[in-house]
Amino acid sequence: MPRTTSLRPHVASPQRLAPPLRSALVDPPGTSPRGLLGRPAPLASSLRLGRAAGWISAVALGALLFPATAEARPDRRGFQSDFTLGVAGCMPYRAQCTSSDVIAGRTGPSLGLGVTLGLRPIKPLLVGASYNFGMFNPKYAVADADYYKVAYQNSFFAVVRPILPIWRFDFGLELGAGWSKQVFRTEPGQAVLRQGSQGFALKVAPVIDFFVTKHFFLGAKADFIFNFHGDVCTETDDGKTVCQKSDSTNQASVHQVIAGFHLGTVF
């Protein structure tokens, strides 16, 4: 009986193809296609190189900022100096930081700074001394004329700061007792030259820092200064000084807060 021949074209299965051609035919979509020589296509190769370069850069930056060696860990024992620069604000005390019966306006914020020098005999404790200078922006008017020109406060404290060190962070609470002096100077032409008070003061200052290097840290701090002054004294243009607890035109004495950017070093 004569043999019959199938007219269907013969198609080789992918398993019988040469490896480069088989990869080009059967690689599923979304995978890196391979050319006839078995090499990655140019686009896929570029993407892989880009990802690798990104990982290498991230690892290099991390190693630069936070080295893993023991020598690069924060050194929290020794002398410490830190500095605060920010904004000083008014907190009511005998005066209310705002209008009274005969004077209209408010005591606005202005520049504030602070410096602390001390010793850390152990990691969780700093003892030392601090200085704060904070300005006010007193915007008051009497008979439609500006009354105050400038106002400021100087403060000196002996301080102790308990600290909770966690990894590269320091969480502290600075406590201080000392002395402060507050002055409100009036505009030229006023019968009153200046008003002010001075005396005992306390400070409470939460602070958080992050060690960028072994010795240098950055963070934020807020100094809350509570004044417990005696009489408020008024100096007039005829050379007289009158001291009393309060007066309807007097904007001293008030408490002060200084908050801002904090930086320092342990050496």
Image: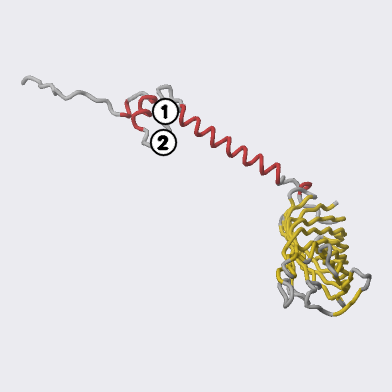
Q: Quadrant of residue 192?
A: bottom right
Where does residue 79 sit, x and y in percent of width and height? 87, 55
Viewer can see residue 172? no
Query: Quadrant of residue 248 in the image?
Result: bottom right
Q: What amino acid does circle 2 point to?
A: Thr
Farthest residue to the left: give it.
1
The image quarter containing residue 12 is: top left
State the quadrant of the N terminus.
top left
> Which residue is disc 2 drawn over?
31
Q: Which residue is mark 1?
A: 34
Q: Secondary structure at mark 2?
A: loop
Whether residue 91 is situated above or below residue 43 in the rendered picture: below
The structure residue drawn at horizontal position 78% and vertical position 59%, both measured from the top left corner, is 112
The 10 Å Cα crowd at callout 1, few under 14, some 14 to 19, many 20 or more, is some
Q: Where 4 falls versus 81 (above or below)?
A: above
Image position of 11 (left or right of 193): left
Image position, residue 113 (x, y; %): 80, 58
Q: Residues within 10 Å of mark 2 (few under 14, many from 20)?
A: few
Q: Residue at x 38, y 25 (%)?
A: 19
The amino acid type found where label 1 is placed reads Arg
Q: Residue at x 79, y 69 (%)?
A: 225
**Which colour style is shown?**
secondary structure
